[in-house]
Amino acid sequence: MTRIAVFPGSFDPLTIGHCDILERALPLFEQIIVAIGHNSQKKYLFSLEQRLAFIEKTFEHEPKISVQHYTGLTINYCQKVGAQYLLRGVRSAADFEYERNISQMNYQVSDQKVDTVFLICQPAYTHISSTIVRELYAGGGNVGVFVPPAIIDLLQTR
């Protein structure tokens, strides 16, 4: 059986922290789907098309990583694509508590059991979040050290 993981998020924008989690997860799975979810409660800085392009450009040379988007519950999306695993990065104890609760609920409500795999963020990336990068970018700051080099040009064309 092919081990498929879904790495869900808004990726508004993709950061080097996201990339680190994905690169470290590559040996664990045959396929990783970076899944951009839609949250009607969120106001996005970058369009869905831009966020898809950020991820596609960054991982264009990695055949095990694909990018898709979805609406609805993440657990339903996992079942739809046949994923057995949810991949989550954890930066802090607060992140872990939040993600643990979601993981336990997902496991209980899924018809096909989907396990969550947590990867602890490298210390060098614990301070990086899409929210902070988005605020820095919106304020005209230099985000070059927080995003993958492949998307710098894409950010400048916004």
Image (cartoon, rainbow, N blue to C red):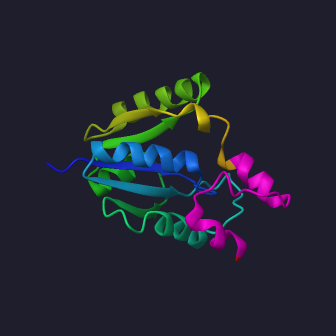
59 falls in the magenta region: no
In the image, taking residue 54 as reference, residue 118 lies left or right, namely left
Give the vertical position of 90 relative to 138 (above or below). above
Q: How many marks?
A: 0
- Our reading of the magenta stretch's main secondary structure is helix
Give the vertical position of 145 relative to 122 (above or below). below
Give the vertical position of 28 relative to 151 (above or below). above
* Residue found at the very far bottom of the displayed protein: 157
Report the residue at 72% width, 51% height from top. 133
Report the residue at 37% width, 34% height from top. 117
Quarter of the image with the C terminus in it: bottom right
Hey, which quadrant is residue 47 in on the image?
bottom right
Q: Position of residue 35 (x, y in %)?
A: 45, 56
Hey, which quadrant is residue 149 in on the image?
bottom right
Q: Position of residue 78 (x, y in %)?
A: 35, 50
132 falls in the magenta region: yes
Q: Which residues are magenta?
A: 131-156
Hey, which quadrant is residue 108 in on the image?
top left
In the image, taking residue 150 as reference, residue 155 lies left or right, namely right
Query: Does residue 57 appear in this view?
Result: yes
| Residue closest to the eye, 76 or 89 | 89
| Residue closest to the eye, 77 or 140 | 140
Query: Does residue 158 appear in this view?
Result: no
Q: Position of residue 151 (x, y in %)?
A: 60, 66
